[in-house]
Amino acid sequence: MRKSGILLPISSLPGAYGIGCFSKEAYKFIDFLKEAGQHYWQILPLGPTSYGDSPYQSFSTFAGNPYFIDLQEFIDKKWLTKKQCLICDNDNNYVEYGDLYKKRYKLLEKAYAKFLAKCDAEEAEAYKQFEHENADWLDDYALFMAIKDLFGGISWIDWPEDIRYRWGYALDYYRSTCSEKIGFYKFLQYMFLKQWRQVKECANEAGIQIIGDIPIYVAYDSADVWSHPELFLLREGSYPAAVAGCPPDGFSPTGQLWGNPLYRWDFHKETGYAWWTRRMEHCCALYDVVRIDHFRGFDEYFSIPAGEETAMNGHWKKGPGLDLFRVMEEKLGKQNIIAEDLGYLTPTVKQMVKDSGYPGMKVLEFAFDVEDTKAENDYLPHNYDRNCVVYTGTHDNETLRGWIDSITKEELALVRRYLHREKATKDVLCRELIRMAVASSANTCIIPIQDWLGLHNAARINFPSTLGNNWKWRLKGDELTSELAAEMRKLNQIYGRC
């Protein structure tokens, strides 16, 4: 039951061509995890990113990110040359999304042309089977992306009303007009899924399970909202009636305005949660364990009137609660799920997590707040029950070393007293916090790789409520050493996680 793993987004893998992908470096990382005695590789959502480059704001909840396709396969098939692919490389070891958008898709279009001309009968049959098995989402997604390209990338709400509202003759017209681009976007999804399945199969054979992420909401500018507006709380003209976010708190005095459309939960219930069941089934095929983001939003969700510039005028509304998850379990069977239950939790949220039986999350960076110094603080390890997942921090937090540098003297003193390391250096404190997480009673322990490497906040993944400098950090190829793997394995052996 006691296991551990590492948090590392696919985009953060090292390697050539501008972004981490399903390349040889992914397989090397799996080898490293096995050598280090780990059982899990936790990643972020795999969807195609849109405005802001966030994997939590995707053009589709079902599609995969074409940036993650390993270009080496196209080089091996002689569909592209290495010289052509090197145009996507950069020297600063950070993902440059704007540069990728301009260059990567042109390469992928060249590869698609060669695929049409050169693919053999076996691959043609595999592609045909892929189209058939995924038609329920693939057709709408490929058409959505093709039309978006035709109109220069603008949001679907700004398209001509005939296709914005999906009138029958307009769908026929654009399917014909955009047939080549539709084929291109289907090809990208075929290659994405083919390569991802190979990575996951390799991980599973090595004893590594993949923890994936399902965002609670979908992006407004997405194939999901365009093709199924009846699922979302929209007003006349298909504009959002209200949007998602979080209320003001100590981290954000005006709250967080996410902007995602809210669900029509009454309609979902009437359909037996059919769309949600499909979504969960798709995620369970991609991952071994699914982390459900913002789990508290299923108990109560924060509704902000559309058009507001902050979240200050929002209010709480009742969600579907456990009814959704009971129905999905009846249809899909019991799945391996982690409930992201961070933040302010009401008694009803706590009860919902308890009744679900899903493990919740504990974050050590939340445990040493001078405003909440009570010994019963839920994030202090002596209060954990076994059915939880402990993290030093998540993708939304500072790195552990960055956090140690940023906290107040009073908070640092709390850390020292709790660890009983009054004179330890900050680097030693970071190692002690990792040791404490691994030693804790939590059944599962997940540590971001940046924390094992002792990296400062330049390696942070995301700064919530900001744009332009997120989701960019990448691991360097020489940072995962045998010495580090041995240290990880030894700690797991000491505390029974091997």
Image (cartoon, helix red, strand yellow):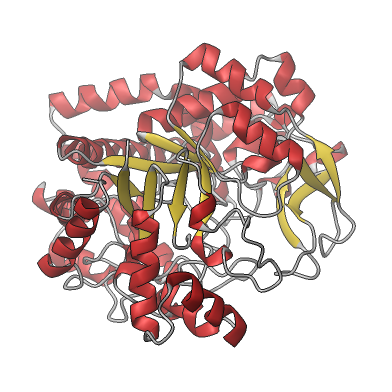
Q: Position of residue 106 (x, y in %)?
A: 34, 58
Q: Quadrant of residue 473?
A: bottom left
Residue at 66 percent of width and 29 percent of height: 228
Q: Position of residue 222 (x, y in %)?
A: 60, 43
Tell whether 321 sits left or right of 203: right
Q: Is residue 249 above or below residue 186?
A: below
Residue at 43 percent of width and 71 percent of height: 419
Q: Position of residue 178 (x, y in %)?
A: 49, 39
Q: Is residue 100 above or below residue 112?
A: below
Front one among 419 and 402: 419
Picture mark count: 0
Tell whether 400 sits left or right of 92: right
Tell whether 361 sits left or right of 224: left
Residue 55 in sight in this render: no
* Image quadrant in which the N terminus is located: top left
Residue at 18 percent of width and 64 percent of height: 487
Residue at 37 percent of width and 20 percent of height: 133
Q: Quadrant of residue 8?
A: bottom left
Residue 458 in sight in this render: yes
Kindly give the residue lying farthest to the right in the view shown. Answer: 313
* Image quadrant in which the C terminus is located: top left
Kindly give the residue lying farthest to the top in the view shown. Answer: 330
Front one among 446 and 108: 446
Front one among 152 and 95: 95
Q: Position of residue 270 (x, y in %)?
A: 74, 14
